[in-house]
Image (cartoon, helix red, strand yellow):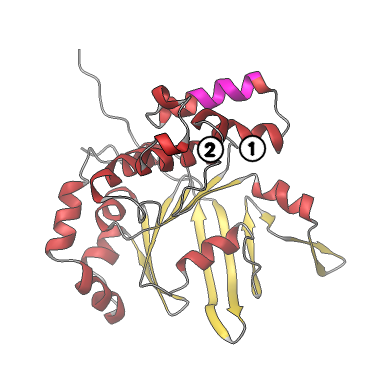
Amino acid sequence: MTTSAPVRVEPAEEPILRIEALEKSFGSTVVLRGVSLEVRLGEVLCIIGPSGSGKSTMLRCINYLERPSAGRIYVDGQLIGARLERGRLVELSANELAAQRQQIGMVFQSFNLFPHMTALGNVMEAPIRVKMEPKAEVERRARELLVRVGLADKADAFPVQLSGGQQQRVAIARALAMRPKLMLFDEPTSALDPEIVGEVLDVMRGLATDGMTMVVVTHEMGFAREVSDRVVFMDGGVIVESGSPDQVLVHPSHPRTRQFLSRITGAEVADQVEEHAAPSARGGG
């Protein structure tokens, strides 16, 4: 008896994330210049671009770790960071903002695990402390998530006892424990040794197959080409080009995109595609 490979659920038509004319400045330094973007429910969007192009800042604005200078961000139809009262925007309180952030999971370059807690404890902490969920139910779900990320046997291990790839997988499980509607990944493999990058990307492939909505800032071009529904190239705080992986990564139309890719592609990208190749998350074989 043979089993077929998992089939990727196609993204829905309606957007789960909508960004309208987003701007962000730090003093006199303008980082984002009127960025507008939509991400559909179940879509995997990969964002590429040179350092300083505004990619990470945009992610941090989505969950209000950075306050936008202008523009609006909506997640599942809800305005992030503020509400409209009598025609004007009123900033949310800290408690209201914390409640909004529960629907947005974020995985950073650094793992940020609590060093005094086991892997299981790290995954359980937020649902118990923030959402006040029953401990027994949270533990059951946390153990299931550790199985999902391939770390069932590391539940009682402390971060210092885990490799970088294992710590990052715990961080992914921790974000998933809050049952987010949207997952944000900010260069999740950039701090990892090359030989363990694949184990984190495999977990992310599984999330894509399961239909998780993901926005991924990445330099892993092979992963972006294989898993994403759409690729966005950013430079100078704006979206320069957006389209399917083949359109942007193989046949880019904008000179700046071609210039960027020419510096990191060729044999390098061919190696990445081969190194991280797996049965397609789209189920196409």
User: Which of these two is toward me, 176 or 33?
Assistant: 176
Quarter of the image that includes the N terminus: top left
User: Which of these two is toward me, 227 or 95?
Assistant: 95
Residue drawn at (48%, 46%) of the image: 213
Residue 227 as seen in the image, left or right of residue 31? left
Q: Is residue 255 above or below residue 110?
A: below
Residue 197 percent across, percent down from the top left: 29, 47
Q: CA distance from mark 1 to mark 2?
A: 8 Å
Residue 57 percent across, percent down from the top left: 52, 67
Q: Which residues are magenta?
A: 136-143
Residue drawn at (68%, 58%) of the image: 80
What residue does disc 1 label? 126
| Nearest to N terminus: mark 1 or mark 2 | 1
The amino acid type found where label 1 is placed reads Ala
Q: Is residue 15 above or below residue 114?
A: below
Q: Label 1: few (<14), some or many (≥20) within 10 Å?
A: some
Q: Is residue 208 above or below residue 59?
A: above
The kind of secondary structure the magenta stretch mainly shows is helix
Q: Residue furthest bottom?
A: 28
| Image mark for residue 174 | 2
Residue drawn at (67%, 22%) of the image: 135
User: Which of these two is toward me, 109 or 183?
Assistant: 109
Answer yes or no: do the residues labelled 1 and 2 have beta carbons within 8 Å? Answer: yes
| Element on which disc 2 rests | helix
The answer to whether any part of residue 275 appears in the image is: yes
Q: Is residue 137 magenta?
A: yes
